C-alpha cells in the first residue's frame, strides 16, 4: 500500500510503501516505523520513452515527445498477478478463462476466475471510533466530479461527504492523470478520455456530529470500508468510475 510522504518532510524516495500489517496498525492510530518504510522498495519503476511522429516515412517537424510509463519490477524469483474484485449483476456470467490483452495489443495475460474466498485480504478497520473521528485512506486513485459555475463538470480533490460529517483535514499530493479508452463491436475506438485523479495514499480526516457521533461513524465505516467512495452517487459517471475500482477506501481512526 502506498504511504503518503509530504514534499517538505525531508529526504525520501519518490514513493514509500506500507506492508498490509503496517497499514492496519496505521488505521488503528499507530504511526508506522520510518525505518521500515525506507527499507520497503517500490514495486514499480518509472520508464521514460522518447518518440517521434512520422509522415510518409519522414519525421514530422516539431513532433518529438517524451512520456513516462510504470513497469513492475521483474526478477527470476518474482511473478505478478492482478486480482480484480467483481460483483456480477443478476443474470450476468463470469468471463471465460483464457488469454486477454493487458495494457496493449502486445501484452497478454492469462485470465483465471477465482472464488470469493480468494478475494483481497484488506487491512481490517478499528471496532470503535472515539469522538466520531474517521480516517479515510485512499487505496486506489479517485475521480470525483462537481458541477462548475458554467454547468460543466470538473474533477475535484474533495470527496462527497456523508451526512452529519465534516472534513477536518486532508493530505493530498498533486493530481495524477488517468487515461481510458474502449472499443466497439468492430474493434474501433468508441471513446477515449483523460482525467485528473486524486492519488492513492491520500488521507482524509472526518468527524461526525449529531446526537450519537461514534455510532454514526461506525455505521458509515462498516458500509464504506474496502468499498469505492462514490459507488452510490446519483451522478452516473461518478458511479461508473467507482464501480470500475476508482476511489477504493479503507477506514481507520485518528486523534
Image (cartoon, rainbow, N blue to C red):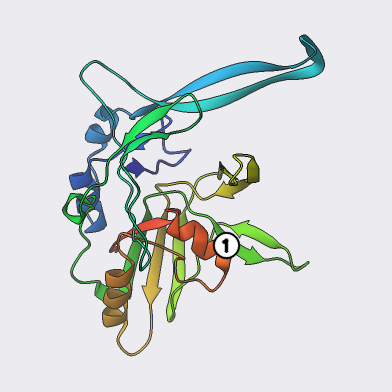
Quadrant of the rendered image containing residue 43: top left
Task: Give the side of residue 18 with respect to residue 170, left or right.
Answer: left
How packed mark 1 is, by other alpha carbons closer than 10 Å (few <14, some 14-19, many 20 or more), is some
Residue 242 position in % (x across, y down): 46, 59
Residue positioned most to the bottom: 211
Q: Position of residue 82 (x, y in %)?
A: 32, 39
The reply to whether residue 131 is visible in this rendering is no
Residue 175 is left or right of residue 101, and the answer is right
Establish if 255 lies above or below 43: below
Taking the view exactly as shown, the residue that stands out farthest to the front is: 186
- Quadrant position of the C terminus in the picture: bottom left
Residue 112 placed where, x, y %?
Answer: 27, 41
* Residue toward you, 98 or 225: 98
Q: Position of residue 231 (x, y in %)?
A: 44, 66
Residue drawn at (36%, 66%) of the image: 91
Residue nearest the viewer, comparing 233 with 26? 233
The residue positioned 51% from the left and 50% from the top of the image is 198
Q: Please give left or right for residue 134 compared with residue 7 in the image.
A: left
Q: In the displayed structure, would residue 126 be above or below residue 123? A: below
Q: Residue furthest top?
A: 58
Can residue 224 be seen in this snapshot?
yes
Residue at 23 percent across and 47 percent down: it is: 114
The image quadrant where one finds the N terminus is top left
Q: Quadrant of residue 16?
A: top left
The number of callouts visible is: 1
Q: Is residue 177 above or below residue 72?
A: below
- Asked if residue 161 lies left or right of residue 12, the reply is right
Q: What residue did someone put label 1 on?
A: 237
- In this picture, is 217 found above or below 148? below
- Say what secondary structure mark 1 lies in: helix
Amino acid at each position: 500500500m502506498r504511504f503518503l510522504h509530504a514534499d517538505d518532510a525531508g529526504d525520501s524516495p519518490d514513493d514509500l510503501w506500507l506492508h498490509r500489517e503496517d497499514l492496519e496498525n496505521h488505521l488503528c492510530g499507530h504511526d508506522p516505523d520510518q525505518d521500515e518504510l525506507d527499507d520497503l522498495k517500490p514495486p514499480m519503476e518509472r520508464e521514460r520513452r522518447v518518440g517521434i511522429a512520422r509522415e510518409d516515412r519522414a519525421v514530422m517537424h516539431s513532433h518529438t515527445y517524451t512520456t513516462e510509463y510504470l513497469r513492475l519490477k521483474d526478477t527470476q524469483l518474482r511473478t505478478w498477478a492482478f486480482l480484480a474484485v467483481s460483483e456480477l449483476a443478476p443474470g450476468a456470467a463470469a468471463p471465460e478463462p483464457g488469454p486477454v490483452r493487458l495494457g496493449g495489443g502486445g501484452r497478454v495475460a492469462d485470465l483465471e476466475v477465482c472464488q470469493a474466498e480468494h478475494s483481497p485480504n484488506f487491512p481490517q478497520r478499528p471496532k470503535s471510533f472515539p469522538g466520531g473521528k474517521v480516517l479515510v485512506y485512499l487505496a486506489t486513485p479517485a475521480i470525483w466530479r462537481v458541477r462548475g459555475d458554467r454547468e460543466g463538470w470538473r474533477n475535484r480533490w474533495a470527496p462527497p461527504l456523508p451526512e452529519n460529517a465534516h472534513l477536518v483535514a486532508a493530505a493530498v499530493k498533486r493530481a495524477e492523470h488517468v487515461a481510458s479508452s474502449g472499443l466497439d463491436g468492430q474493434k474501433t475506438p468508441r471513446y477515449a478520455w483523460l482525467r485528473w485523479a486524486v492519488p492513492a495514499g491520500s488521507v482524509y480526516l472526518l468527524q461526525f456530529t449529531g446526537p450519537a457521533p461514534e455510532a454514526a461513524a461506525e455505521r458509515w465505516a462498516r458500509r464504506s470500508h474496502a468499498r469505492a467512495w462514490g459507488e452510490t452517487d446519483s451522478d452516473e459517471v461518478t458511479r461508473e468510475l467507482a464501480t470500475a475500482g476508482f476511489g477504493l477506501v479503507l477506514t481507520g481512526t485518528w486523534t
